[in-house]
Amino acid sequence: METRATLPQLLAACSLIDRYTYDPEETFSAPITAFHGVDDWVASEETKLWEGLTTCPFLLHTMPATSSSSTRTSPRTACWPSSGRNC
């Protein structure tokens, strides 16, 4: 029963993704903090590109390597608004 309840939400999300059009002029009006691991296969230069997507402060934190970081199976870069308020 739970699967049926989530199917409409999944289809709605797919529909939103299909209709999305990237606008390079559109930016966030919220501060962004990004975390990047020193051994990540996503280059730190790519992570720094998040700075161009906000009109507010941007912080980049580079995290030290861990024993599990050598697998490099997925990117561990995370970016999100730094607070719930606009700057």
Image: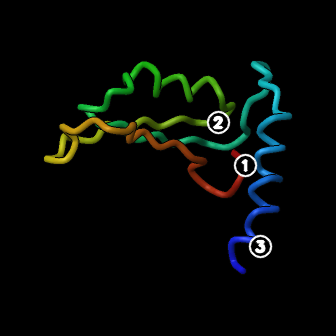
Nearer mark to the viewer, of 2 and 3:
3
Residue 52 position within the rendered picture, expressed as x and y whole percent measured from the top left: 62, 23
Which residue is pictured at 72% across the width and 36% down the height?
Answer: 28
- Residue ID for mark 1: 86
The label on residue 5 is: 3
Which residue is pictured at 19% across the width and 47% down the height?
Answer: 68
Q: Which type of secondary structure does the marked residue at label 3 adopt?
A: helix
Residue 24 position within the rendered picture, expressed as x and y whole percent measured from the top left: 75, 19
The label on residue 56 is: 2
User: Could you tell whether 70 is left or right of 80 in the image?
Assistant: left
Which residue is pictured at 56% across the width and 29% down the height?
Answer: 50
User: Could you tell whether 60 is left or right of 1 in the image?
Assistant: left
Residue 55 position within the rendered picture, expressed as x and y whole percent measured from the top left: 69, 31
* Residues at marks 2 and 1 touching, judged by CB atoms closer than 8 Å: yes
Q: Which type of secondary structure does the marked residue at label 1 adopt?
A: loop
Q: Is residue 50 above or below residue 31?
A: above
